[in-house]
Amino acid sequence: MSNRTMRGLGLVTLVLAALLGSAYALGRGLVAEMGVMPNGSPANANVNSTRYADQPPATPPTPTPSASPSPSPRDRELVNNGEGDGPNGSMMSTGSSGVALTFDDGPDPQYTPQVLALLREYGVKATFCIVGENAESNPDLVQAIVSEGHTLCNHSWDHDENMGKRSPEAIRNDLLRTNAAIRAAVPDARIAYYRQPGGNWTSPIASIAQDMGMTPLHWAVDPSDWQAPSATRIIQTVLSQTEPGSIVLMHDAGGDRRGTITALEYLLPELLSRFKLEALPTGTT
C-alpha cells in the first residue's frame, strides 16, 4: 500500500473519529506516536529548538472566526490598497478563492526542512513569516525557502509581541534589521509582507510596514499549533474553519512542532482536494 493511500486512510479515520466524538481518544494515540504526553506537553522536546519566552503555556485554544467564503471585488480592492479586513487594516483573506498557508517563527533547522519537503511533495507554495535572528542563524534555510518558490514575510527581529509599545523609530529599525538579515541570505529578495507577532497590531506598526512596502498580514484560521496540541486537533480546526479566501496560520518553529508536521501530512492532500493552495503574491516591486 502506498504512503499516500495510507495517509488518505488515516485522514478518513481521523475525521470520522472527530465527528463521532472520539477525537480525544484518537488524539491521545497520535500524540503518543509523536512522543508527546497525554496532557499535551512534549515528552522529549528538543531543547535546542527555537523558543520564545512569550509563548504561553498550553491551554485550550480559543476558536477563531473564519474568513468570508467569497471575497467581493471591493474586498480585493481593499487588500490591494493595504486596507484589509483584519486588525488595523491588515490582510485577513487572500482576496480570491485561493487559500494561503503561512508558517511563522522560522526558519528552524529541525522543522522547516520537514515542512519544505511536504510542500514540495504536494507541489504547494506557501508563505513563510521569518524571524530576523533565525534568518541570521540559518541563512541556508532562507535560501531554500526562496529557491522553492515560497513567499517571504518579515516577522520582526526576535518575535516581539510588544512592538506596539515601542517608538516609531524603534519599530522601523526592527523591521529594517530583519529585512537585512533575510537579504543577507538572499540578496534582492522580495519581502512583500509583515506579520506582527501575536497579532498585536497597532496603527504605527501597520503604517510603518506599509511605508516600507510590506502589506500587514493577519490570518483567518488559527489552529493554535504553537500550543503543541495533538495533530488531530490541528486537523479538525483547519478543516472545519478553512473556506475560499482563508489565510491559515501555522508554525515551523518556536517550540515542538511535531504535531504540525504530522497534521500537514493529512491536511495537504485534503486541502488540495477542496481548494487551490497558493503562496501570497509578491507583487513586482
Image (tube, helix red, strand yellow):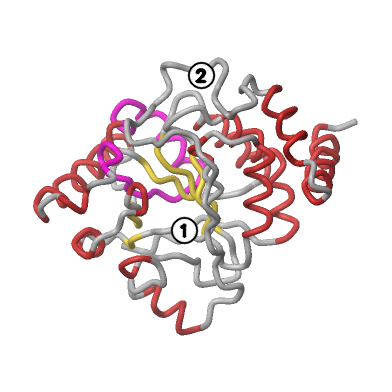
Q: Is residue 135 magenta?
A: yes
Q: In this view, does 19 lie to the left or right of 68?
A: right
Q: Is residue 92 left or right of residue 272?
A: left
Q: Residue at x 63, y 19 (%)?
A: 35
Instruction: Please tell me whether mark 2 sits on a helix, a strand or a loop.
Output: loop
Residue that carries the numbered disc 2 in the rendered image: 45
Residue 31's place in the image compared with 7, above or below, is above
Q: Would you identify the image quadrant in which residue 108 lies? A: top left
Residue 34's place in the image compared with 234, above or below, is above
User: Who is closer to the viewer here, 212 or 265?
Assistant: 265
The magenta region covers: 134-160
Q: Which of marks 1 and 2 is nearer the N terminus?
A: 2
Q: Residue at x 49, y 40 (%)?
A: 251
Amino acid type indicated by mark 1: Trp
Q: Where is residue 71 in the image (x, y as percent from the top left)?
A: 54, 77
Amino acid type indicated by mark 2: Ala
Q: In which quarter of the image is the N terminus?
A: top right
User: Who is closer to the viewer here, 115 or 257?
Assistant: 257
Q: Position of residue 260 (x, y in %)?
A: 59, 36
Q: Would you identify the image quadrant in which residue 240 lies? A: bottom right
Q: Residue at x 44, y 45 (%)?
A: 128
Callout 1 touching callout 2 (CB < 8 Å): no
Q: Residue at x 50, y 83 (%)?
A: 73
Residue that carries the numbered disc 1 in the rendered image: 219
Residue 283's place in the image compared with 279, above or below, is below
User: Who is closer to the viewer here, 124 or 132?
Assistant: 132
Number of marks: 2
